[in-house]
Image (cartoon, helix red, strand yellow):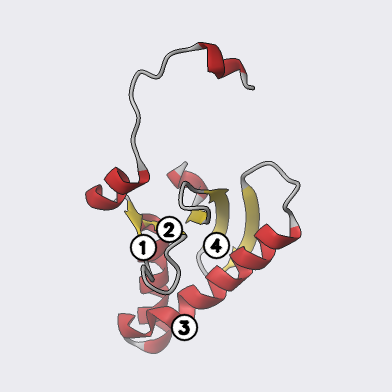
Amino acid sequence: MSAFDDFPVVSSYTEEQAIEDGVLVHPYPTRFPWLLLTIAVHVECERIAKERYGTADEYSKVVMPLIMDAVMAVRASREKDPPIVLEHTAAGTIWIFPNAKGGMTIMLPSDY
C-alpha cells in the first residue's frame, strides 16, 4: 500500500496507448512480446547502428546486447525496487522498469 492509494485516479495512460502514440516501441513483438523500449532508446540504438555499421539495418547488433544486459540486471536484482539502473550501455545510462506485460520497459532517465 502506498500513500497514493487513497487518491482517485484522475487519468491513466496505458502501454497500448503509448505504443499507438509512438512513445513506446515493441522492437521484437513476436520474439520478445514482454519487451518495450521508449522511442528515445530505440532512436539512440538506430543512431549507433548507423554510426558503427553505416546502416540502421544492423539495429539488432546494438539493441540485442542492450536487451541481454537489461535481462541479466533484472535477474540479478529481483529484490530491488525499480528502477534498475545500468550505466555504460550502448544507449548510455538506461533505467529498467517492470511493465504490464510481465516484462520490462527500457528507457533513458530523461524519458521518465
Q: Residue at x 67, y 67 (%)?
A: 72
Residue type, mark 1 in image: His
Question: 53 left or right of 104?
Answer: left
Cα distance in 3D space between marks 4 and 1: 20 Å
Q: Nearer the viewer, mark 2 or mark 4?
A: 2
Disc 3 from disc 4: Cα separation: 16 Å
| Residue where numbered disc 4 is placed | 92
* Disc 3/disc 2 C-alpha distance (Å): 17 Å
Residue, far left:
21
> Could you tell me the amino acid type at mark 4?
Gly
Residue 39: image quadrant is bottom left
Of label 3 and label 4, which has the lower sequence position?
3
Circle 2 residue:
36
Q: Position of residue 55 (x, y in %)?
A: 31, 85
Q: Do tag 3 and tag 2 residues touch (Cβ < 8 Å)?
A: no
As drawn, the label of residue 61 is: 3
Q: Position of residue 36 (x, y in %)?
A: 43, 58
Is disc 4 surrounded by few (<14), some (14 to 19) or many (20+) residues within 10 Å? some
At a point 45% along the width and 69% down the height, the residue shown is 32
Q: Is residue 110 above or below residue 106?
A: above
Work out whether residue 91 or residue 70 is closer to the camera in this orientation and state it. 70
Mark whose residue sits in front, 3 or 2: 2
Amino acid type for the residue under numbered disc 3: Lys
Residue in the image at 50% along x and 76% along y: 64
Whole-percent x, y for residue 100 in the image: 47, 46
